[in-house]
């Protein structure tokens, strides 16, 4: 089985993660933020898979499945929150949801 | 097992009282009284059944495993000292339930739940012979007390409740650190890691470490006592608490501090306690004078009584650190007498507040003509508080002073001057509230039969303590003697700094 | 019969309990019978005990009875026990008898007062405490009685509590005496620490064994007890409370502030005479305090207008005589004067009470006058009391007791000519102010229409006390007049007799004549000043110096002013300034500091999610950088 070159795999994961992070930081729409977080989670998952293949351990893939579950949960909770947010504020702009400032 | 039941009955009674509020507020009150009565029966059974055949100083002991890996056990023990304090707890428990009969109308069930849980925490504190368990009960007292002040208190209750909680919590954490420190010191020297009080007694600790650990305990207890300058939570808490809360605070919570000093600080760290004694006694005397002067300045009657507690508990601290039998017995009598006299004063102030809706002395005057019975009872307890012979406080204060005199004359003199100050504020209460020209009052009723009953009990007790305190002294004697013996072990090693006299019991020729 | 000793204090206490619990519901007749009856029974028991004590004296002339052990801790074991010896027997008899008469008087005098039962309750409590004081077998029980009478004094001075002035006087009395009591208490600590007991007789024995003459401990102990005695007996420097104490009802002034309680200090010193003998400096201090007080109070009495205040200062002055006697070692002379003083001063107060009642609460002597015809019985009894107080030679009891004191001051080893002269000047002052009072009140033109005749309840005590004031002196006759020192012989087993200095005794008759002349000339001077007005006292008082002196004396030599400036004002200032407890503000400061930090940190909480994310990202980068590069 061809072994994935670890450097490229990790670089891709880092790139994806950075993309997601930038997305989270610059977008104001909650939907896009959630999507960016998905990307970050998957980037982390990718890193696990790459590492698992490098050391020929199944743990990496187990972790990816675990991350998938977490992501699914996160999306469901996140979307519910998003609906509530929209109902309350009539907007999807996160900066508008700043009631908890000190 | 009877000791555990004493605590459990109150816990269950509290839960029951809360639940019973569904049906009627009256049910909550009756269930609370019932729980206290059962406890009283349990105590008397425990005291009488084992009174004859006692094992060492413990009348009854209970030792069960709790968390063996850490050396934590459910170790409870009853001796003369804790027996008397538990009797005081139950007595004031009854009084608290009775005095809130009319005053508390809001969330009655939850009120009694808190009340009984505080009491069970206090009884636990008086019984625990395992430091971890002791700490557990120590904290158990706090939370319901916080609610009691915060929910049923007067105008400024939230501030007072938070202040109370912060002071006691922070100092409690210091004690926890000291407990764990002691645990490890003992573990390292003997290889046995245990929180058991009896095993920790006589741990050999280097003087410096012992001093730090002792201070950890001391500060926790000094906050509760309260000793200067850690007293400032007390006036606020007492003033803002509902009557029952003030009674329990002044009558019982302060006493846990004194109990802690006697049970833990002195026996666990005899050398450090001896070295620290002059400082502690100085603090005590300053507290006596300072509290008395401040009490005189107050216009809020409840606050005034609160400051008198600072002054009176100074005598307790003084007596404990005189480290001889007479003074310690005096401190114990003072604990009991102060619990009753100050408790009664708080009940009376509460009753007055209920009738004329003010605690401000400027709005009172001439009440004697309107409510003579109340005036007479207040007069009696003010006299107790100024140390009139024949009433309990006199015996306590004078025994303390008799014990302290051989050790430190200047402090004795200053403390005696404190009694003059006590006269000033006590007479001031009578003058401002009951004497003087009569003001306009709405129709007032004098003490009701229920109030007369509870007052009569307290009066009988305070006079009994004053004229025939011997049974009480006899009950406490084994405990005090064992504390004194514990001190004697290391007596030769270091002379006590700063004490001109010898430490033996006063009266050497 | 001595087994019933405990009943003597117990009966008045029982009366108190009955009246305190049920007094408000009882009729006046029942209240009076309980109040007077309990003291009457107590008097009867005391008389029976006295008779049996004299007829068949117990061994060593001492009888003691233990009721129960009060406290027992280590070697501290004071008991509730009574001790009867000639000294306490005399005190008990005087107290019960005078108390009974005054109670009887009060049952009529106070009949219109709303607080009738409260009055008798307090009075009974007082009698019980006073008897406990004199019968106590140990110093702690004595202290109980001591504080108990102080409390009753407070309660009764402030009896009419609606008037804040009465409350002030009452508090002053209690607090000033408590200052003295502090010294007393410290004395108890000292005695117990060094002698290991508080039982009075053992204390005295051990003190004599363990302490040498002039040893510092003996001096300290005696000085501390003196502190207590000075407070209770209103002697210099704690005398200021007694004149104000006249705010109480007149029977109270008669009983507590003349006949019994204020003499407790004298009793204490006589009881502890062994200690004082071991401390000659303190004993001389007692004499000097007595001499100074009797002069100061005598001058003050001279310029008072209020009849009761004159009597109050006179009481201070007469107790000064007793202290003088104690100070020169004439223990039994002091007790003798205590007894005769109890009779004639109680009489004077009771008669003054009738005058005040007849004048509708008027106390000012300058508004009285000519009452001689309106109140004949009162006049005659008052006159007898006044004569006795002025020590009118031969016919009055006061002469014998005061003469004995003057004589002792002259001829005792620790006496001196100066003390004698002070006593003599005091005697002149005494008869001057006493007859000033008599002339102003009962002679001259009537300024007020009086229609009042006292009933039997008031008349009987006046007559009995008047008789005693006349003949009470026969129990101790000096050598020059028959020589029958029965009283001091009786006290002999409890109080050692005074040893006179040889060589000064031959002058006894001369001295007595001098004293008699002084006393008579005082009366004559009073006659000149205040009745014939040959010499205008008003004119003297109006001159610059006279007015200044008058004001100075009137205000009690400025002691009140001084104490106010020295103690009261600073204390109140201190309390008021620190009302909010500066320690609390330290904790408030900590709380404020926390608030500042909290405000600063809460600035970073913008509520913007992206801001937080940036924070997390940067934090993660920094954390990774630390791990990687360090």
Image (tube, coloured by chain):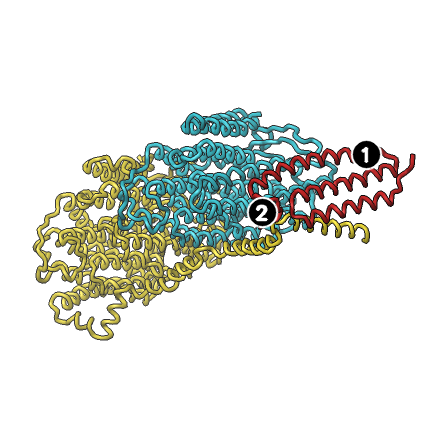
Chain colours: A red, B cyan, C yellow
Residue A10 seen from this side: yes
Left or right relative to C216: residue A82:
right
Image coordinates of residue A102 in percent, x first then y, are 58, 50
Residue depicted at 28% across the width and 45% down the height: B441
3D distance between C-alphas at marks 2 and 1? 38 Å
Residue B40 seen from this side: no
Residue depicted at 24% across the width and 68% down the height: C550
Using the image, tell me which numbered label, if any, was put on residue A61: 1
Using the image, tell me which numbered label, if any, was put on residue C447: none
Image coordinates of residue B45 in percent, x first then y, are 51, 25
Which element is circle 1 on?
Answer: helix
Residue depicted at 78% across the width and 39% down the height: A45
Left or right relative to C476: residue B4:
right
Q: Residues within 10 Å of mark 1 (few under 14, many from 20)?
A: some
Q: Chain of mark 1?
A: A
Residue depicted at 82% across the width and 34% down the height: A59
- Nearer-N-terminus badge (2/1): 1
Image coordinates of residue C571 in percent, x first then y, are 40, 59
For label 2, the residue is A100
The residue lying toward the viewer, choosing from B350 and B151, is B151
> Would you identify the image quadrant in which residue C405 lies?
bottom left
Q: Chain of mark 2?
A: A
Q: Quadrant of the N terminus of chain B?
A: top right
Left or right relative to C446: residue B166:
right
Which element is circle 2 on?
Answer: loop
Image coordinates of residue C8 in percent, x first then y, are 30, 39
The residue lying toward the viewer, choosing from B462 and B371, is B371
**Tally of marks:** 2
The residue lying toward the viewer, choosing from C339 and B440, is B440
């Amino acid at each position: 089985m061809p072994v994935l070159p670890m450097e490229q795999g990790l670089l891709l994961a880092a790139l994806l993660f950075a993309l997601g992070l930038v997305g989270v930081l610059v977008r104001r729409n909650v939907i896009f933020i959630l999507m960016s977080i998905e990307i970050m989670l998957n980037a982390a998952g990718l890193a696990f898979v790459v590492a698992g293949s490098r050391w020929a351990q199944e743990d990496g893939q187990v972790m990816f499945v675990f991350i998938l579950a977490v992501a699914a949960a996160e999306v469901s909770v996140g979307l519910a929150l998003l609906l509530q947010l929209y109902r309350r504020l009539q907007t999807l702009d996160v900066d508008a949801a700043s009631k908890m400032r000190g | 097992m009877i000791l555990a039941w004493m605590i459990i009955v109150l816990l269950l009674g509290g839960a029951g009282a809360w639940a019973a509020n569904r049906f009627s507020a009256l049910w909550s009150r009756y269930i609370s009284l019932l729980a206290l009565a059962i406890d009283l029966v349990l105590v008397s059974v425990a005291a009488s059944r084992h009174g004859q055949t006692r094992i060492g100083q413990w009348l009854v002991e209970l030792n069960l495993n709790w968390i063996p890996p850490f050396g934590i056990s459910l170790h409870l023990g009853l001796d003369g000292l804790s027996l008397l304090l538990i009797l005081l707890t139950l007595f004031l428990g009854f009084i608290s339930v009775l005095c809130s009969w009319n005053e508390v109308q809001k969330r009655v069930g939850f009120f009694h739940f808190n009340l009984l849980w505080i009491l069970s925490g206090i009884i636990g504190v008086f019984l625990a012979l395992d430091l971890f368990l002791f700490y557990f009960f120590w904290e158990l007292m706090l939370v319901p007390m916080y609610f009691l002040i915060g929910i049923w208190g007067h105008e400024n209750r939230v501030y007072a409740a938070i202040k109370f909680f912060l002071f006691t919590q922070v100092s409690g954490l210091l004690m926890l650190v000291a407990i764990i420190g002691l645990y490890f010191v003992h573990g390292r020297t003997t290889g046995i890691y245990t929180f058991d009080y009896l095993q920790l007694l006589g741990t050999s600790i280097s003087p410096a470490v012992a001093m730090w650990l002792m201070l950890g305990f001391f500060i926790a207890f000094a906050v509760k006592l309260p000793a200067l300058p850690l007293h400032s939570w007390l006036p606020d808490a007492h003033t803002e608490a509902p009557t029952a809360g003030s009674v329990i605070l002044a009558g019982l919570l302060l006493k846990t501090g004194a109990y802690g000093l006697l049970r833990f600080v002195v026996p666990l760290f005899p050398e450090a306690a001896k070295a620290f004694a002059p400082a502690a006694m100085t603090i005590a005397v300053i507290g006596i004078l300072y509290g008395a002067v401040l009490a005189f300045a107050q216009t809020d009657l409840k606050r005034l009584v609160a400051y008198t507690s600072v002054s009176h508990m100074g005598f307790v601290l003084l007596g404990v650190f005189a480290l001889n039998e007479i003074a310690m017995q005096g401190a114990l009598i003072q604990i009991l007498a102060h619990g009753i006299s100050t408790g009664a004063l708080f009940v009376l102030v509460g009753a007055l507040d209920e009738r004329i809706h003010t605690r401000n002395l400027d709005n009172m005057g001439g009440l004697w003509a309107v409510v003579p019975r109340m005036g007479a009872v207040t007069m009696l307890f003010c006299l107790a508080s100024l140390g009139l012979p024949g009433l309990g406080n006199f015996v306590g204060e004078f025994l303390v002073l008799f014990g302290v005199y051989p050790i430190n004359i200047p402090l004795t003199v200053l403390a005696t001057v404190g009694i003059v100050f006590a006269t000033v504020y006590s007479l001031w209460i009578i003058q401002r509230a009951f004497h003087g020209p009569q003001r306009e009052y709405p129709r007032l009723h004098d003490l009701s039969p229920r109030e007369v009953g509870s007052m009569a009990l307290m009066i009988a007790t305070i006079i009994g303590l004053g004229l025939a305190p011997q049974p009480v002294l006899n009950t406490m004697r084994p405990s005090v003697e064992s504390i004194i013996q514990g001190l004697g072990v290391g007596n030769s090693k270091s002379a006590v700094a700063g004490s001109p006299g010898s430490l033996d019991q006063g009266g050497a020729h | 019969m001595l087994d019933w000793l405990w009943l003597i204090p117990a009966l008045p206490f029982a009366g108190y309990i009955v009246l305190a619990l049920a007094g408000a519901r009882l009729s006046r007749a029942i209240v009076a019978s309980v109040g007077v009856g309990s003291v009457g029974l107590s008097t009867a028991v005391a008389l029976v005990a006295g008779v049996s004590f004299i007829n068949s004296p117990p061994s060593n002339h001492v009888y003691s009875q233990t009721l129960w052990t009060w406290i027992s801790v280590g070697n501290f074991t004071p008991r509730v026990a009574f001790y009867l010896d000639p000294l306490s027997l005399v005190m008990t008899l005087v107290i019960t008898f005078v108390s009974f008469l005054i109670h009887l008087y009060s049952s009529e005098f106070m009949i219109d007062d709303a607080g009738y039962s409260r009055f008798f309750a307090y009075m009974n409590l007082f009698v019980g405490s006073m008897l406990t004081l004199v019968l106590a077998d140990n110093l702690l029980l004595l202290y109980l009685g001591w504080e108990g009478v102080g409390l009753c004094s407070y309660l009764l001075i402030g009896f009419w509590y609606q008037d804040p002035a009465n409350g002030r006087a009452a508090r002053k009395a209690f607090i000033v005496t408590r200052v003295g009591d502090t010294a007393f208490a410290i004395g108890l600590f000292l005695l117990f620490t060094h002698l290991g007991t508080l039982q009075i007789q053992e204390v005295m024995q051990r003190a004599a064994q363990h302490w040498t003459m002039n040893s510092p401990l003996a001096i300290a102990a005696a000085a501390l007890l003196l502190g207590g005695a000075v407070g209770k007996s209103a002697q210099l420097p704690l005398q200021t409370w007694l004149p104000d104490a006249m705010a109480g009802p007149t029977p109270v002034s008669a009983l507590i502030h003349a006949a019994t309680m204020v003499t407790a200090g004298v009793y204490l010193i006589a009881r502890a005479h062994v200690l004082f003998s071991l401390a000659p400096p303190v004993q001389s201090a007692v004499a000097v305090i007595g001499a100074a007080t009797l002069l100061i109070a005598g001058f003050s009495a001279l310029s008072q207008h209020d009849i009761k205040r004159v009597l109050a200062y006179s009481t201070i002055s007469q107790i000064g005589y007793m202290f003088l006697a104690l100070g020169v070692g004439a223990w039994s002379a002091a007790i003798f004067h205590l007894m005769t003083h109890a009779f004639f001063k109680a009489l004077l107060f009771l008669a003054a009470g009738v005058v005040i009642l007849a004048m509708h609460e008027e106390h000012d002597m300058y508004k009285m006058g000519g009452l001689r015809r309106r109140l004949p019985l009162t006049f005659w009894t008052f006159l007898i009391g006044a004569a006795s107080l002025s020590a009118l030679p031969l016919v009055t009891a006061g002469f014998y007791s005061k003469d004995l004191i003057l004589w002792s001051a002259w001829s005792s080893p620790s006496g001196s000519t100066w003390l004698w002269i002070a006593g003599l000047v005091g005697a002149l002052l005494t008869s001057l102010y006493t007859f000033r009072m008599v002339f102003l009140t009962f002679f001259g033109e009537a300024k007020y229409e009086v229609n009042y005749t006292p009933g039997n309840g008031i008349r009987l005590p006046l007559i009995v006390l008047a008789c005693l004031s006349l003949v009470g002196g026969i129990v101790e006759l000096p050598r020059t007049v028959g020589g029958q020192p029965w009283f001091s012989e009786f006290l002999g087993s409890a109080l050692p007799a005074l040893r006179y200095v040889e060589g000064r005794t031959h002058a006894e008759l001369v001295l007595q004549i001098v004293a008699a002349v002084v006393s008579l000339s005082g009366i004559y001077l009073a006659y000149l000043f205040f009745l014939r007005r040959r010499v205008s006292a008003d004119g003297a008082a109006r001159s610059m110096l006279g007015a200044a002196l008058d004001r100075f004396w009137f205000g009690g030599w400025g002691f009140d002013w001084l104490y106010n400036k020295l103690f009261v004002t600073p204390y109140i200032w201190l309390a008021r300034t620190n009302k909010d407890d500066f320690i609390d503000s330290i904790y408030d400061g900590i709380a404020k500091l926390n608030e500042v930090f909290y405000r600063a940190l809460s600035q970073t909480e913008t509520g913007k999610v992206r801001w937080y994310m940036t924070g997390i990202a940067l934090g993660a980068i920094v954390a990774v950088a630390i791990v990687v590069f360090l």
